[in-house]
Image: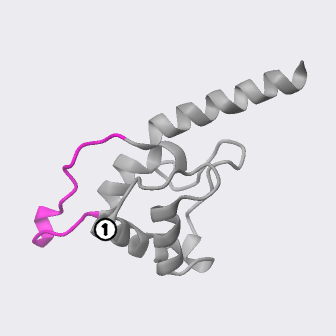
Amino acid sequence: MKKKLFGLLVGASLVLTLAACGGGGDDTKDTASGGGADPEKLFSQKCSSCHGADLKGGGGGSFPDLTQVGSRLSKDEIETVILNGRNAMPKGQLTGDDASAVAGWLAEKK
């Protein structure tokens, strides 16, 4: 009985996480710097619901702290995680130049 309840809670949490990670509009261009993706805005719209606006994560370790992710992973490794997902993180939240921009921004977090 406890295993079923635990499974139900974990499953419900995962569904809520997947629903919360998406969303946001397409207003992610940085017009002040002449175009290009604004990685902070993209992160805020697509990632902060799980990783926190302060990048500190949460969810009992389910959502990693990203404040120093650049000291653990390279830009390319971060971009791979963004594109392909990992653990509870779904793939495809960001793609193309947006994924690259956020990966570069996160890689600076040391």
Q: Main secondary structure of the magenta part?
A: loop
As drawn, 4 above or below 96: above
Q: Which residue is mark 1?
A: 96
Q: Is residue 59 above or below residue 75?
A: above
Query: Whole-percent x and y of residue 76?
Result: 48, 80
Q: Residue at x 58, y 77 (%)?
A: 73
**Image coloring type:** one colour
Task: Indicate the position of residue 14 as horizontal and vertical percent values.
Answer: 61, 36
Q: Specify whether residue 33 is painted magenta.
A: yes
Which residue shows up at 47% across the image and 79% down it?
Answer: 75
Q: Horizontally, is 97 left or right of 43 in the view?
A: left
Q: Amino acid at mark 1?
A: Gly
Report the label total.
1
* The magenta segment: 23-38
Asked if residue 29 is among those painted magenta in the image, a careful observer would answer: yes
Question: What residue occupies the far right of the structure in this picture?
Answer: 1
> Residue 80, image x and y in percent?
50, 71
**Image quadrant in which you'd find residue 99:** bottom left
